[in-house]
Amino acid sequence: MIDYGLKFASGVVAGLVDVFNVDLKNEGPNTFVFDVSSLIGMGVPMPFNLTMSKAPEFSNEKGEILLHIDGDFTSKDMSQYVP
């Protein structure tokens, strides 16, 4: 049963990686733009760009992956998000 669970989890992760790679291959200007309004309780859509300013850094010593997310809101007028 444990062996089946590990193989199943491995297959799920491999599938998610394949989906991400296809998305990355077909990247467009809005590939990494997500609506974060529900995360902060806003009623209006709040598009947030989750692109990275440089590649991730991997540390085997610390067991960490450092992501350099350079998030930008896509709207020119941020006043619409201020209550």
Image (cartoon, helix red, strand yellow):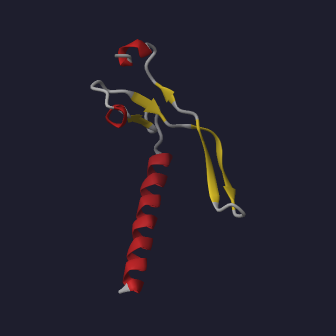
Residue farthest to the right, as pictured: 61
The correct choice, above or below, for 53 with respect to 80 in the image is: below
Q: Which image quarter is the N terminus in?
A: bottom left
* Identity of the residue drawn at 49% across and 54% down: 21
What x and y, as percent, mark residue 59?
A: 69, 58
Lateral position of residue 21 relative to residue 62, left or right: left
Q: Position of residue 23 (x, y in %)?
A: 44, 48
74 left or right of 64 in image: left
What residue lies at 64% left-to-right and 62% top-to-bottom? 63
Callout count: 0
Quadrant for residue 41, please give it: top left
Quarter of the image for the C terminus: give it: top left
Residue most extreme to the left: 43
Query: Left or right: where does residue 13 sit relative to residue 68?
Result: left
Looking at the picture, how far across and down is residue 16, in whole percent?
42, 59
Query: Does residue 55 appear to the left or right of 10 in the view shown?
Result: right
Q: In terms of image quadrants, where is residue 12?
A: bottom left
Judge whether 47 appears above or below 55 on screen: above
The residue that appears at 45% across and 24% down in the rendered structure is: 74
Q: Is residue 16 above or below residue 32?
A: below
User: In the picture shown, does residue 9 fall above or below 45?
Assistant: below
